[in-house]
Image: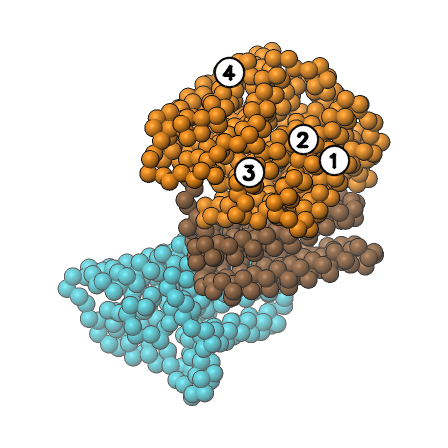
Chain colours: A orange, B brown, C cyan
């Protein structure tokens, strides 16, 4: 029963934060809850619990395989957040802290949701909670980003609800009793009505794909990531998107059980490759290093979809990639936040010479960029290699070729941009603000630890993780 | 049972086109609110006055979709001194034709999808799909934030219409989801519109074009 | 089926003689709503007689098309009128696919008028013709859709069988759509104001500005026949006149045409002319109404 703690403790923390009187000490709630969350999440990872049949929520294999990394990322972001909110002490942080905690609780619920309706409600709630967080900076550009996020994201949620209804009707049409837990839907299997399952799959893929930021539903992503604080970008790119990804995996299992697995795989491959291609092309053109991270994130989401469409080995690689991407991308977002504050802008044309303005962050940023573009020995190299091997093993030679081509283009785009901001001479026109510039331990150690974890994950993938991923793949691909 | 229900669904589909063809914001809001009320009556016609939760859904839908949200939008219009014209990006005639084409496509698509015998004679599926498509046309084809919100609501109405198929079989949870979504969505949207107003002195989303490649 | 010569002549005379009554009725209704006495109901007959006696003024630039155009238009309209069945009496000429001929005849008559208008080489007439044909694109789409829906509903492609039964659920949509088409085709308010004398805002009237004498009489008579034609089409499409006994059918037809005419008069008194750029929107609405009637016929036929 204690997996519910992962949901309710953060939500309680959110309520507490909403009523906490002191602006200075309130951020400390973030690491406090984060520490507890990590302890419970990893404890449950090591000692799995059984979930009763018919339960709406439970720490099942898929949740075990993904949720701990979100928890870990949150903890490090929380430490960073304390330092960040101290720097930004001019802005009230009540909503920020409370909503961030609420988002953590809802992400935990979304990963554990074993019921179609519950899954949808958590996704919906996460979207609404994130809206004010993107808006935290309050600038005109932040408003623009928020509006686009709300409109595109809202439409995505609406479509995923429609898809959930279709899946529900598929079950009822096939003689189901209205039990919409995933185990019940999978058990119904071929009894589900095929046309309705296909309709549901299309709508759910578009709906949750919008949350994931797959092209062509990715348009909110660069704006939101570019304007939100770095910590929010990290949570969005590596926390919220993973909920949508596990949702797609769960639905895919139902679709496969209904006998339409080929369609599901083909559509996943197509949308994955398309996202990678779009992201790679935009990476060559963008002139803003925070937006660059967003396009890179779209590319990673494409890789996840690609893996999920390549069968069991591919899905295993995709789960691996969830971990490696979350850790690496988290570090990049936090470094980018530091660099943006140092330069006062994230536009390439105005920011340069960050190696002098923010030397430690820049160094980590460059390291992170190499990690994210799949250079060994960081974890993304190994996870993407496994995706590639899955593609070759299943005979998808063309897919593998396009995959490699996109990676190459992305590498050009990302490194070009990264060195453009890091190298060169700082613009002297900018008046430097000592306090904002300071690279204190609080804003340096969390990204460093994330990078270290990424390295460790790549060099020595612990067996408890690999077995968790294997169990998750078994849950999706060969359900009892 | 199905004849009067179909008449109401037909009315809702007609209101879709009215919303697409109106050049006044208030007319769009009115079309949306009438549609909300029409939708609110439908659960009673499908299930009858069998249980409290059906009645609850019906009453809540009429109140929220029919009165509360339109009232909120009208207030936002007054508060922000928004002019009454709709300002289309896709002009009215193309929007109408798109809407009509969407309706035809919805009917054609709905014939492919099998329905349980008790739903076979109803227009629920084509009506739902048509509303969703109308919502999309309004979302894409209108410049003002308020009209985009209207489009989103019509899209929601379509999903609600579809949800009526599941009303008997699954818990009302899904229905609550819609209501929650609507209220909170609009609430948040309202706040944001307020902010947009302060930042740009306009509710014209065409001015939201700083962020792009 | 070709009826005897006597029937042909009788029906022709009926059409030709009764048609000019309708504009008179409309004007009477308008006068009544406005509280005036108004012109006599038979005014158009007097006008036609007067015009017939006048001579023709022809531009030196105009070719004989200036005279032939109105004549072609009138003949085409008369042909279309004879194709239209009159309740249980049926049509004079009836064959499979005759509705296509009817639509083409209507288009031919429009072509004739526009041709004659262009012959004058005047900018106003050219503008009027341009407007007329650009509206026609939309109204014709609506008419064709309306007739298709009748055809799908009755499973026949001949006007006589098509118009006999009523349309069923889509009847309201069809009636509304056809009424808008009637207003547009006959250049009534809210599309065009027959009373206006401001050339810039006119459509139909602008096309016939330079016509005089007998050609003008032919144009005016043709216009009144067109009005009667559409009023009859509307009545028969909506009401199941074809299956009744002759006497009640005749009564219903007359009542229906009268109702439509009075309706036009009321619309004309109570509504203002539409702004020019809004006209396509209303015509699109008519098209969509007919389209939905078609959809209903299709759906209802299948279910």
Which is more N-terminal, label 4 or label 1?
A: 1
Residue at label 1? Answer: A6
Q: Nearer the viewer, mark 4 or mark 3?
A: 3
Badge 4 sits on which subunit?
A
Badge 1 sits on which subunit?
A
**Residue at figure coordinates x 38%, y 28% from the top left:** A353
**Residue at figure coordinates x 34%, y 34% from the top left:** A427
A403 up-or-down from A126: above or below: above
> Mark 2: which secondary structure?
helix
The answer to whether residue B161 of the structure is visible from this angle is no
Badge 2 sits on which subunit?
A
> Mark 3: which secondary structure?
helix
Q: CA distance from mark 4 to mark 3?
A: 30 Å
**Residue at figure coordinates x 45%, y 73% from the top left:** C271
Q: Quadrant of residue A98?
A: top right
Contact check, label 1 and label 2, Cβ < 8 Å:
yes
Residue at label 3? Answer: A84
For label 3, the crowd category at 10 Å Cα-Cα, with few meaning under 14, some 14 to 19 and many 20 or more, is many
Q: Nearer the viewer, mark 1 or mark 3?
A: 3
Residue at label 2? Answer: A71
Contact check, label 4 and label 3, Cβ < 8 Å:
no
Q: Nearer the viewer, mark 2 or mark 3?
A: 3
Q: CA distance from mark 1 to mark 4?
A: 34 Å
**Residue at figure coordinates x 29%, y 79% from the top left:** C50
Instruction: In this rendered view, identify the residue nearer to me: A275 or A440.
Output: A440
Where is residue A310 drawn, in percent x and y? 61, 19
Instruction: In this rendered view, identify the residue nearer to me: B28 or B206.
Output: B206
Instruction: In this rendered view, identify the residue nearer to me: A470 or C105.
Output: A470
């Amino acid at each position: 029963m204690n997996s519910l703690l992962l949901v309710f403790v953060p939500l309680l923390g959110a309520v507490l934060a909403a009523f906490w009187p002191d602006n200075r000490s309130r951020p400390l709630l973030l690491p406090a809850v984060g520490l507890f969350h990590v302890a419970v999440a990893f404890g449950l990872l090591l000692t799995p619990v059984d979930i009763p049949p018919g339960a709406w929520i439970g720490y099942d294999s898929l949740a075990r395989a993904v949720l701990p990394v979100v928890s870990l990322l949150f903890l490090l972001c929380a430490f960073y957040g304390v330092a960040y909110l101290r720097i930004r002490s001019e802005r009230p942080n009540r909503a920020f802290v409370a909503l961030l905690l609420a988002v953590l609780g809802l992400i935990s619920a979304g990963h554990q949701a074993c019921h179609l309706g519950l899954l949808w409600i958590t996704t919906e709630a996460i979207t609404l909670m994130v809206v004010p967080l993107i808006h935290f900076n309050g600038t005109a550009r932040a408003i623009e980003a928020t509006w686009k996020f709300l409109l595109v994201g809202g439409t995505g949620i609406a479509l995923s609800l429609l898809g959930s209804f279709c899946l529900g009707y598929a079950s009822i049409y096939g003689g189901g009793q209205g039990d919409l837990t995933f185990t019940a839907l999978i058990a119904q299997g071929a009894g589900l009505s095929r046309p309705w399952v296909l309709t549901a799959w299309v709508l759910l893929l578009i709906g949750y794909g919008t949350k994931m930021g797959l092209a062509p539903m990715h348009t909110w992503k660069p704006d939101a990531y570019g304007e939100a604080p770095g910590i929010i970008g990290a949570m969005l790119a590596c926390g919220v998107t993973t909920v949508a990804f596990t949702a797609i995996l769960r639905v895919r299992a139902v679709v496969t059980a209904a006998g339409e697995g080929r369609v599901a795989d083909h559509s996943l491959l197509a949308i994955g490759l398309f996202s990678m291609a779009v992201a790679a092309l935009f990476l060559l053109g963008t002139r803003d290093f925070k937006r660059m991270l967003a396009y890179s994130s779209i590319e990673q989401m494409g890789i996840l979809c690609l893996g999920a469409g390549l069968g069991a080995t591919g899905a295993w690689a995709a789960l691996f990639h969830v971990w490696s991407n979350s850790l690496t991308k988290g570090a990049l977002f936090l470094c980018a936040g530091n660099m943006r504050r140092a330069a006062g802008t994230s536009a390439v044309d105005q920011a340069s010479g960050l190696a002098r303005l923010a030397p430690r962050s820049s160094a980590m940023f460059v390291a992170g960029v190499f990690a994210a573009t799949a250079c060994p020995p960081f974890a993304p190299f190994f996870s993407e290699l496994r995706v590639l091997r899955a593609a070759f093993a299943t005979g998808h030679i063309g897919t593998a070729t396009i995959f490699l081509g996109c990676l190459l283009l992305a590498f050009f785009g990302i490194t070009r941009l990264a060195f453009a901001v890091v190298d060169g001479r700082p613009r002297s026109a900018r008046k430097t603000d000592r306090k904002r510039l300071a690279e204190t331990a609080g804003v340096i150690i969390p990204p460093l630890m994330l990078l270290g974890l990424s390295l460790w994950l790549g060099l020595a993938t612990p067996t408890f993780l690999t077995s968790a991923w294997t169990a998750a793949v078994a849950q999706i691909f060969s359900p009892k | 049972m199905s004849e009067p229900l179909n008449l109401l669904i037909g009315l809702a589909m007609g209101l879709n086109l009215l919303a697409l063809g109106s050049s006044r914001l208030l007319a769009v809001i009115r079309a949306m609110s009438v549609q909300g009320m029409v939708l609110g009556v439908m659960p009673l016609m499908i299930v009858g006055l069998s249980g409290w939760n059906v009645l609850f859904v019906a009453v809540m839908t009429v109140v929220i979709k029919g009165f509360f949200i339109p009232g909120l939008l009208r207030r936002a219009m007054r508060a922000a001194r928004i002019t009454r014209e709709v300002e289309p990006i896709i002009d009215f005639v193309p929007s109408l034709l798109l809407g009509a084409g969407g309706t035809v496509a919805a009917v054609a698509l709905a014939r492919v999808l099998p329905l349980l015998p008790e739903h076979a004679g109803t227009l629920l599926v084509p009506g739902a799909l048509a509303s969703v498509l109308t919502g999309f046309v309004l979302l894409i084809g209108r410049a003002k934030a308020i009209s985009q919100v209207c489009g989103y609501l019509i899209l929601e109405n379509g999903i609600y219409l579809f949800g009526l198929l599941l009303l008997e079989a699954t818990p009302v949870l899904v229905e609550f989801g819609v209501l929650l979504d609507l209220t909170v969505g609009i609430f948040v949207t309202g706040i944001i519109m307020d902010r947009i107003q302060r930042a740009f002195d306009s509710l014209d989303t065409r001015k939201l074009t700083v962020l792009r490649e | 089926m070709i009826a005897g010569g006597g029937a042909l002549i009788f029906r022709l005379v009926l059409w030709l003689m009764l048609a000019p009554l309708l504009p008179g009725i409309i004007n009477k209704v308008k006068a009544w709503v406005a509280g005036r006495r108004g012109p006599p109901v038979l005014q158009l007959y007097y006008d036609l007689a007067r015009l017939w006696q006048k001579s023709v003024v022809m531009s030196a630039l105009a070719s004989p098309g200036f005279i032939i155009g109105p004549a072609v238009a009138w003949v085409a309209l008369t042909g279309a009128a004879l194709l239209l069945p009159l309740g249980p009496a049926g049509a004079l000429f009836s064959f499979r696919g005759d509705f296509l001929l009817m639509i083409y005849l209507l288009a031919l008559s429009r072509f004739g008028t526009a041709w004659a208008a262009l012959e004058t080489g005047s900018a106003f007439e050219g503008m009027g013709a341009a407007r007329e044909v650009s509206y026609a694109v939309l109204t014709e789409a609506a008419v064709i859709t309306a007739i298709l829906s009748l055809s799908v509903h009755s499973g026949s492609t001949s006007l006589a069988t098509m118009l006999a039964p009523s349309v069923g659920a889509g009847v309201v949509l069809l009636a509304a759509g056809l009424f808008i088409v009637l207003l547009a085709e006959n250049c009534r308010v809210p599309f065009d104001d027959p009373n206006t004398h401001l050339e810039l805002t006119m459509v139909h009237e602008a096309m016939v500005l330079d016509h005089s004498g007998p050609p003008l009489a032919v144009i005016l008579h043709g216009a009144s026949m067109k009005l009667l034609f559409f009023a009859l089409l509307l009545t028969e499409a909506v009401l199941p006149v074809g299956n009744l006994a002759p006497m009640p059918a005749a009564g219903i037809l007359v009542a229906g045409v009268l109702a439509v005419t009075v309706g036009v008069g009321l619309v004309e008194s109570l509504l203002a002319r539409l702004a020019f750029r809004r006209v396509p929107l209303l015509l699109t609405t008519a098209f969509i109404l007919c389209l939905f009637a078609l959809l209903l016929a299709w759906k209802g036929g299948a279910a």
